[in-house]
Image (cartoon, helix red, strand yellow):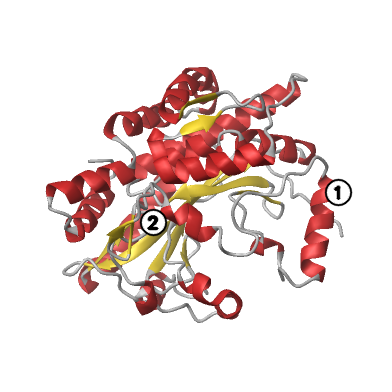
C-alpha cells in the first residue's frame, strides 16, 4: 500500500474548532445541529463550506480555509461564528467550548445520522457513547514528505506542553474528575486514538495502515485518530491533542505555538540538524502527567530523563520561538500563550468559577459562554 502525500505549501495553516450547542436558559446541551446546518447551507449547495456536522447532534465544527497566517485562519473562524450566531440567537441557543461540558449526561446525547458514526458507536459501545468531547485541530502544511515523520517525532516531545496549555475538561457529568484534561483520557479509549505510533520511515507508516485496513481495525485512513497525525490528503501534519478552547484568542495562541514549532523543526532539517525525540515510555508518561496535573505537571523534557515544571518549560520556550513567529506573522498570537500562563488554563479558570459559586456548574457553563462571546479568557 502506498500513501501519497499531497503537495502543500510550507507552513500554511488551517484550524478546526468543535463547538457545543447549549440552551440559553438551562446551559444544557441542545440537539439542534441538523436545524442549524440546514439554516446556514448556501442556496444550491450541499453544505456550508466552513460549518460541518460532528459525531453528536449537540456539536458543530467550524473550519477555516487554508491560510498563510494564524491571524488569517482566525478571521475565517470569526466570520463563521458570526454567521452561526445569526441562526442560533432566535433558537435561544448559545455556543460554548471546553474539552467536556461540565454537567451534561452522555446518555442523553444523540448521534448524527451517518453510517460512519453508527459504525463507530456499534463497534465501541459504552466508550463510544462517552465521547461528549470537544477539541481544536490545527493543520500545518509540510512541503516535503520526508520531513513529516521527523517533525512529528519532535513535536511529540512538546505534547505535554500543548496538552497542559489547552486543558479544559476538569468536570464530567457534574463531578470534578481531579484531572485537568479528562477528555485526553476519554478519547484514547477509542481504537487508534491517543499517542501515535512512532515510525522512522514512511514505508513503516504504509505497512501499519495496510495492516489496520486488512484486519478491519479501520476502514479509512481518517480513522487513525492519533493526537498528532499526518494528513496525507491535505499535505499537513495535524495536531489533535488540544481540548476545546473557550475563546478565539486561546485558539489562535495554541495554533501559533504549533505553527512555530513545526516551522522551527522544518528549518532545523533544512540546516542538517538532528531533531529531538524521546522513548515511547516517556511520551506515555508525559501524556498522563499533563492530563492529570495540567500546568502543575512536572514533565520529562528529553531522552536523558531531565524534568521541569511544564509552565516553566513553556515560558522558556516562547523566546526561542519568537524569531520564527515574527517570520510567520504570528508574534501577537504567540504572545497569547503568556496570557494563558498568567490567567491560568481553562481548567483552572473553570475551577475558580466553581469555587466562587459553591460548586455550581451552571456558573461554569455561563463563564464558558461569556468567554466565547468575549473572544478572550476572562
For label 2, the SS is helix
Q: Quadrant of residue 343?
A: top left
The residue that label 1 is drawn on is 203
Name the residue rendered at 40%, 41% in the picture: 293
Name the residue rendered at 74%, 46% in the picture: 7
Dot 1 or dot 2, earlier in sequence: 2
Residue 268 appears at what percent x and percent y? Answer: 69, 22
Residue 208 appears at what percent x and percent y? Answer: 80, 56
Q: Quadrant of residue 121?
A: bottom right
Check the picture and name the quadrant holding the C terminus. top left
In the depicted structure, whether residue 317 falls above or below residue 208 = above
Left or right, 39 with respect to 209, comes to left
Q: Does the image show residue 9?
A: no
Q: Quadrant of residue 150?
A: top right
| Distance from the alpha carbon under mark 1 to that under mark 2 | 39 Å
Q: How many labels were placed on the picture? A: 2
The residue that label 2 is drawn on is 80
Q: Nearer the viewer, residue 375 or 363?
A: 363
Circle 1 Cα neighbour tier, 10 Å, few/some/many (<14 / 14–19 / ≥20): few
Left or right, 83 with respect to 200, comes to left
Name the residue rendered at 20%, 70% in the picture: 92
In the depicted structure, whether residue 121 falls above or below residue 54 = below
Residue 165 appears at what percent x and percent y? Answer: 42, 38
Residue 57 appears at what percent x and percent y? Answer: 41, 74
For label 1, the SS is helix
- Observer-side mark, 1 or 2, equals 1
In the depicted structure, whether residue 350 falls above or below residue 345 = below
Point out which mark residue 230 bears: none
Q: Nearer the viewer, residue 31 or 314?
A: 314
Q: Nearer the viewer, residue 356 or 92?
A: 356
Amino acid at each position: 500500500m502506498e500513501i501519497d502525500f499531497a503537495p502543500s505549501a510550507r507552513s500554511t495553516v488551517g484550524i478546526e474548532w468543535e463547538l457545543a450547542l447549549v440552551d440559553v436558559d438551562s446551559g444544557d446541551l441542545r440537539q439542534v445541529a441538523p436545524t442549524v446546518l440546514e439554516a446556514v447551507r448556501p442556496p444550491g449547495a450541499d453544505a456550508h463550506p466552513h460549518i460541518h456536522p460532528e459525531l453528536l447532534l449537540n456539536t458543530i465544527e467550524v473550519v477555516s480555509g487554508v491560510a498563510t497566517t494564524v491571524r488569517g485562519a482566525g478571521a475565517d473562524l470569526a466570520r463563521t461564528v458570526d454567521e452561526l450566531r445569526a441562526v442560533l440567537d432566535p433558537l435561544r441557543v448559545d455556543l460554548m467550548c471546553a474539552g467536556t461540558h461540565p454537567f451534561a449526561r452522555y446518555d442523553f446525547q444523540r448521534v448524527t445520522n451517518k453510517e460512519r458514526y453508527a459504525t463507530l458507536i456499534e463497534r465501541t459501545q459504552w466508550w463510544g457513547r462517552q465521547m461528549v468531547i470537544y477539541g481544536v485541530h490545527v493543520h500545518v502544511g509540510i512541503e516535503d514528505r520526508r520531513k513529516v515523520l521527523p517533525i512529528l517525532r519532535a513535536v511529540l516531545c512538546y505534547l505535554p506542553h500543548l496538552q497542559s496549555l489547552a486543558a479544559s475538561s476538569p468536570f464530567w457529568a457534574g463531578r470534578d474528575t481531579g484531572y485537568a484534561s479528562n477528555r485526553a483520557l476519554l478519547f484514547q479509549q477509542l481504537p487508534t486514538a491517543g499517542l501515535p505510533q512512532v515510525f522512522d520511515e514512511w514505508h513503516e507508516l504504509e505497512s501499519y495502515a495496510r495492516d489496520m485496513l486488512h484486519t478491519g481495525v479501520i476502514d479509512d485512513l481518517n480513522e487513525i485518530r492519533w493526537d498528532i497525525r499526518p494528513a496525507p490528503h491535505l499535505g499537513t501534519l495535524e495536531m489533535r491533542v488540544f481540548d476545546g478552547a473557550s475563546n478565539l484568542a486561546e485558539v489562535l495562541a495554541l495554533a501559533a505555538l504549533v505553527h512555530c514549532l513545526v516551522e522551527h523543526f522544518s528549518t532545523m532539517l533544512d540546516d542538517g540538524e538532528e531533531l529531538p525525540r524521546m522513548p515511547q515510555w516517556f511520551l506515555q508518561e508525559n501524556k498522563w502527567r499533563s492530563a492529570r496535573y495540567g500546568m502543575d505537571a512536572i514533565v520529562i523534557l528529553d531522552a536523558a530523563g531531565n524534568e521541569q515544571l511544564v509552565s516553566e518549560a513553556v515560558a522558556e520556550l516562547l523566546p526561542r520561538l519568537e524569531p520564527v513567529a515574527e517570520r510567520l506573522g504570528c508574534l501577537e498570537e504567540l504572545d497569547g500563550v503568556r496570557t494563558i500562563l498568567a490567567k491560568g488554563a481553562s481548567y483552572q479558570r473553570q475551577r475558580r468559577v466553581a469555587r466562587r459559586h459553591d460548586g455550581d456548574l451552571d456558573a461554569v457553563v455561563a463563564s464558558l459562554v461569556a468567554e466565547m462571546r468575549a473572544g478572550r479568557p476572562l
